[in-house]
Image (cartoon, rainbow, N blue to C red):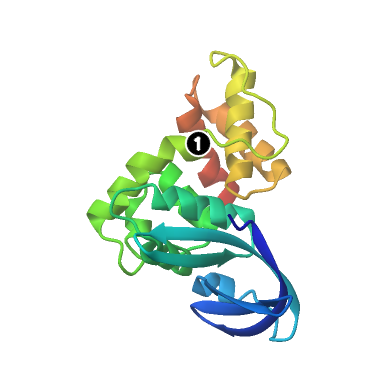
Amino acid sequence: MFAYFHGELIEASPDEVVIDVSGVGYRLLISAATFHQLPDPGATIRVLAHLHVKEDILQLYGFLDEEERQLFRLLLSISGVGPKLALAVFSGLKVHEIQEAIVSNMPERLCEISGVGKKTAARIILELRDRILKLQPAGGRAPSSPVSDVSRRDDAINALVTLGFSRSAAQKAVKQSLASLDEPEVEDLVKASLLAVRTP
């Protein structure tokens, strides 16, 4: 229903903002990570929105970038994860760190977040891992034949770009990983490349 709100930031706290849009004040719940990126009250901002409907309650949630909103919606698709917990996830880790923890099967990283236990972390990884790996960056091309080295390389590069790394860094890490692995699957190549791209 609501794509975004563009207006004056009236007030902000670590968990919510109020935005004046043509004389109407809208209250949106946000993560602490989003709060730290906000300008001072009085500034004009554009906040992406998600309307959560539960029984007779309508609640707006706000995000400054599309990646965070998309991951928020993916988290909501998991049984047992509500909007409050999804926002807590963003307050504990950055978007690319959450995606990396999911893709690399590191539940211990997710368990560092308040409210996320071992079972919830395992469920998040189980249900979202493949969906995140298959994400294509905007304008990205469709994957080629899965048996091709070129295809595996491109798929791995696209996965790293989706995780927030620059394309040049992703290409360098994947090239390095391909040289050390013998016909790896895309999943193994992404794991090795994540380690490589984080190593100075």
Q: Which residue is mark 1?
A: 133
Residue 200 visible in the picture: no
Q: Nearer the viewer, residue 72 or 176?
A: 72
199 vs 173: above or below = below
Residue 74 in percent (x, y) is at 45, 48
* Quadrant the N terminus occupies: bottom right
In the drawing, does residue 2 fall left or right of residue 127?
A: right
Q: Residue 111: x and y, percent?
A: 32, 61
Q: Quadrant of the C terminus?
A: bottom right
Q: Residue 134 vs residue 122: left or right?
A: right
Location of residue 25 by image quarter: bottom right
Q: Which residue is at the front of the view, 167 or 6? A: 6
Q: Amino acid at mark 1?
A: Leu
Q: Nearer the viewer, residue 158 or 38?
A: 38
Asked whether residue 50 appears in the rendered view, the answer is: yes
Residue 5 placement (x, y as % from top left): 67, 66
Q: Say which element carries label 1.
A: helix
List x then y, in percent, for residue 138: 69, 39
For this orientation, the residue located farthest to the left is 119
Horizontally, residue 136 falls left or right of residue 191, namely right
